[in-house]
Image (spheres, grey):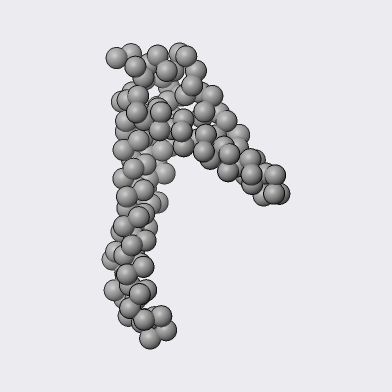
């Protein structure tokens, strides 16, 4: 397999860094869910603790997914490149919708996702991932 391009390594490092807030938030929720749920149990009942645990689990899964894709991009795995292209294309659509309804911070997301989609679809980059 050919050497992973520098741009892909930068993106993979960023994706791995994005996993950290998900994992830390999940850990924080797991560690504090008992205390928090007891504090609001009288107001919301027992559903709150369950919702906290489900939220923590989802955040944990997302964090592991981000870390896995980041590591796989770094190692030059084709499935990770395809995953980035598909997800950035989906977010490209949502960013465009955000821009059209006047959410101007979506412009930054749009530009980033255009870059990711175009970069990882370039022939020279695709060749490195085969």
Q: Measuring from the top left, give residue 8's x and y in whole percent.
A: 42, 25
The quarter of the displayed image where residue 78 is located: top left
Q: Can residue 65 be seen in this view?
A: yes
State left or right for residue 121 relative to residue 96.
left
- Name the one closer to the observer, 62 or 86: 86
- Name the one closer to the observer, 40 or 82: 82
Above or below 30: residue 48? below
Above or below 28: residue 108? above
Above or below 29: residue 45? below
Q: Is residue 12 visible?
A: no
Specify the farthest residue to the bottom: 42
Residue at left 44%, top 18%? 125
Residue at left 33%, top 78%? 46
State left or right for residue 95 relative to residue 120.
right
Residue at left 54%, top 24%? 118
Q: Measuring from the top left, give residue 94's x and y in whole percent.
A: 58, 43
State left or right for residue 87 relative to residue 129.
right
Q: Measuring from the top left, give residue 111's x and y in whole percent.
A: 61, 34
> In which quadrant will I find the C terminus?
top left
Residue at left 32%, top 53%? 60
- Name the one closer to the observer, 4 or 58: 58
The quarter of the displayed image where residue 16 is located: top left
> In which quadrant will I find the N terminus?
top left
Q: How many numbered circles are shown?
A: 0
């Amino acid at each position: 397999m050919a050497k992973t391009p520098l741009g892909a390594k930068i993106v993979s490092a960023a994706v791995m860094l994005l996993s950290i807030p998900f994992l830390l938030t999940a850990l924080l929720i797991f560690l504090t869910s008992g205390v928090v749920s007891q504090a609001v149990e009288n107001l919301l009942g027992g559903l709150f603790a369950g919702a906290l645990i489900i939220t923590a689990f989802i955040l944990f899964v997302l964090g592991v997914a981000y870390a896995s894709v980041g590591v796989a991009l770094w190692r030059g795995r084709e499935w990770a490149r395809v995953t980035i292209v598909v997800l950035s294309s989906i977010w490209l659509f949502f960013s465009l919708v955000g821009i059209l309804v006047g959410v101007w911070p979506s412009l930054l997301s749009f530009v980033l996702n255009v870059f990711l989609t175009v970069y990882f679809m370039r022939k020279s980059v695709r060749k490195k991932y085969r």
